Image (cartoon, grey):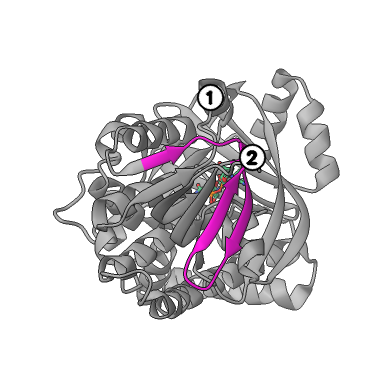
Amino acid sequence: MTKHAPISKTDIAIIGPGPVGLITALACAQETPFSISLFGTCPSSEQLENDTRTTAFMVPSLTLLDHLKVWPETQKHASPLKHLRMIDDCASFVRAPDCLFSASELDMEAFAQNIPNKHLNQQLINLVEGHANITWVKTQAVTSICPEHDHVMIETQEGQSYKACLLIGADGRNSPARRASGIQEKVWSYEQTAISCNFTHELPHNATSVEFHRPSGPLTLIPLKENHASLVWSLRPKQADDMLQLSTDKFCQQLEQTMHSIWGPITSAGKRVAFPIKGMKLDHFAAKRIFLVGEAAHVVPPIGAQGLNLGVRDVAYLVESLKSQTDLNTGIHSLESAYNKARQHDVWSRTMTIDWLNKSLLLSYLPLKILRTAGLNAMNASHTLRKLLMNEGLGASLDLPTLMRPKQKVVL
Ligand SMILES: Cc1cc2nc3c(=O)[nH]c(=O)nc-3n(C[C@H](O)[C@H](O)[C@H](O)COP(=O)(O)OP(=O)(O)OC[C@H]3O[C@@H](n4cnc5c(N)ncnc54)[C@H](O)[C@@H]3O)c2cc1C
């Protein structure tokens, strides 16, 4: 007779130790009375170092990082984003006006803080590893997720079995948790690839993020410390391939030329990494005891620094509902509907707005360009419209959950 390995039990199982999974583990452990298990491999220092991206965290997300004690340590690596400049560089017959937004218009120090992913992820890992209420199951992969009537069964590649009351899928865009939940996704490609790298330049950036709106998509510059910045450059796949092949010197020249030398000569550029740009939309976000967060729940092009900020809001809303539960079994259906309701408007409206913005650049359809130009003209003219748009971009217009509301003002 074969001897089966014992089944371990946990209240909440979180699949995927990406940034959203790590933040979810910390938030659940701090804010709820339940036992928490996180499943997945801990990235090596080499893997952390290889993620050269940076993330612009809007103020509500920073407030959450502050509540979870992530911000004090990451703060020293962060750079403020005080102004946002948009430049129409489509060389089209209808040219939209330049727009400049400043955080001071909203009486804020900065819209966001740009944090290198490697520092953020390292600090999240340190806090999760040091947390007494989180069990990190360092499996190579979760290989089976089976939702049952009153629990979810989980199996790992190493043959361990777990039984959880509730499962949170933070397992990225190809989420096995989403497949297990039966939630259908709609995925589309933009025929664009984003090139990301960090670079240095001669003139100061004055804490200004610049977005050049180009026919292949936006070229976004995000300020880092001193004369350093990070780049997210959306290109057609063939153009991106060509750009990856260039020597560093040639790439710097090409970048400077495309940026119209606004920050002077580009003196060096780090490793270039390519990301195919996709979109994904779900009908709902929770079913069969499985709750989806981060890129398991939505994928948007890297425009306006929205992706991870949306993921952080998923966590904040989910934890807000979990906090009020005493029994995960009896409350599971109301939890699912509360989470579906809380996330629909925010996720869908942002996915559609980013899709529209991206397509208004990619498609050479004149009425769309006229509409975009008229919108930007109206925004330049109206103070109220500008404030509305800035608050919308920050996610500050939403009825934010407790974790995103400041205990005291966050020191930027
Ligand atoms: C170039 C670029 C720039 C960006 N800039 C910004 C920005 O400035 N601001 C912003 O808000 N967003 C930004 N984003 C978006 C942001 O990077 C993503 O939203 C974020 O990385 C998603 O994190 P995640 O934890 O949901 O997914 P992931 O980082 O994909 O993590 C998923 C985790 O699940 C694990 N996993 C998968 N399957 C299994 C399994 N079977 N078992 C166990 N573990 C599993 C994976 O190993 C991984 O650790 C940017 C994106 C790009 C491409």
Marks 1/2 in contact by CB < 8 Å: the verdict is no
Image quarter where the C terminus lies is: top left
In this rendering, the answer to whether 83 lies above or below 198 is below
Identified by mark 1, the residue type is Ser
Task: State how far apart marks 1 and 2 are (Cα).
Answer: 19 Å
Image quarter where the N terminus lies is: top right
Q: Which residue is mark 1?
A: 44
- Residue under the point 54% across and 34% down: 41
Identified by mark 2, the residue type is Gln
Element type at mark 2 = loop
Residue 50 in percent (x, y) is at 59, 26
Q: Which marked residue is nearer to the observer: mark 1 or mark 2?
A: 2
The reply to whether residue 230 is visible in this rendering is: yes
- Residue under the point 57% across and 55% down: 295
* Magenta-colored stretch includes residue 139: yes
Q: Nearer the viewer, residue 158 or 246?
A: 158
* Magenta-colored stretch includes residue 301: no
Q: Which residues are magenta?
A: 135-159
Element type at mark 1 = loop
- The quadrant in which residue 367 appears is bottom right
Q: Nearer the viewer, residue 252 or 8?
A: 8
- Residue under the point 32% across and 70% down: 321
Q: Which residue is mark 2?
A: 157
* Mark 1 C-beta to ligand 1 under 8 Å: no
- The quadrant in which residue 261 appears is top right
- The quadrant in which residue 132 appears is top left
Q: Residue furthest left?
A: 408
Mark 1, Cα crowd under 10 Å, few <14 / some 14-19 / many 20+, is few
On screen, residue 186 versus residue 120, left or right, reads right
